[in-house]
Every structure is written in C-alpha cells, then in structure tokens.
Amino acid sequence: MSVEIEVRVQPRSSRRAVERQPDGSYKVWVSEPPADGAANEAVCVLLAKEFGVPKSSVSILRGHNGRNKRVRVG
C-alpha cells in the first residue's frame, strides 16, 4: 500500500531530519544543495529511512524544482 504526502524541503540545512507537522504534512531538512537533483535524492533517502521502506519505493510526484513537494511512499 502506498501513501501520498505533502513535504516542505529545507535544502542546505545544517541538519538532516524529518518532522511531521500538525496539519499532517512533513518538513524535511537536508544538507545537500538544490542543484542537479541532489536535495531531491536526499529527501527520498531520508523519507525511505523514516518510513522503513526501500529508497526505490519513494518517488516525487510533483514539485521537483520547488520546496513544496508531493511524494509517494510505498
């Protein structure tokens, strides 16, 4: 079973973390810059670890070039 979640990304952060927001969305901090998809890749790795699924089970559906993303997990 897969779920779709809303994610707000903070690239170039000093920490790497995932935090669930009160509205049910997630905020993800990654240290990678948003160039060449590095931040998107880091987001997928972090979310896979958070949800206990393989990295291949996490995909960005919308928002590849922005901070607000729609992500499918599972």
Image (cartoon, rainbow, N blue to C red):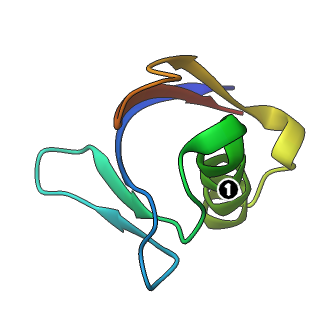
Q: Is residue 10 above or below residue 57?
A: below
Query: Foreground residue, 24 or 6?
Result: 6
Looking at this rendering, what residue extends furthest in the left direction? 22
Q: Is residue 6 above or below residue 33?
A: above
Q: Residues within 10 Å of mark 1 (few under 14, many from 20)?
A: many
x and y percentages locating residue 10 in the rendered image: 36, 58
Please state which amino acid type lies under the numbered disc 1. Answer: Ala
x and y percentages locating residue 16 in the rendered image: 52, 77
Q: Quadrant of residue 66?
A: top left
Query: Foreground residue, 11 or 16?
Result: 11
Residue shown at the point (73%, 56%) measured from the top left: 45
Going by the image, does 56 lie left or right of 64? right
Query: Foreground residue, 52 or 56?
Result: 56
Query: Foreground residue, 46 or 29?
Result: 29
Q: Is residue 22 above or below residue 58?
A: below
Going by the image, does 49 lie left or right of 25? right
Q: Is residue 7 above or below residue 1?
A: below
Residue shown at the point (64%, 62%) measured from the top left: 46
Going by the image, does 56 lie left or right of 74? right
Give the residue number, with chain letter if any, for mark 1: 42
Looking at this rendering, what residue extends furthest in the front direction? 35
Looking at this rendering, what residue extends furthest in the bottom direction? 14
Which quadrant of the figure contains the N terminus?
top right
Q: Which secondary structure lies at badge 1?
A: helix
Residue shown at the point (67%, 56%) measured from the top left: 42
Residue shown at the point (47%, 24%) measured from the top left: 65
x and y percentages locating residue 69 in the rendered image: 41, 29
x and y percentages locating residue 32 in the rendered image: 60, 63
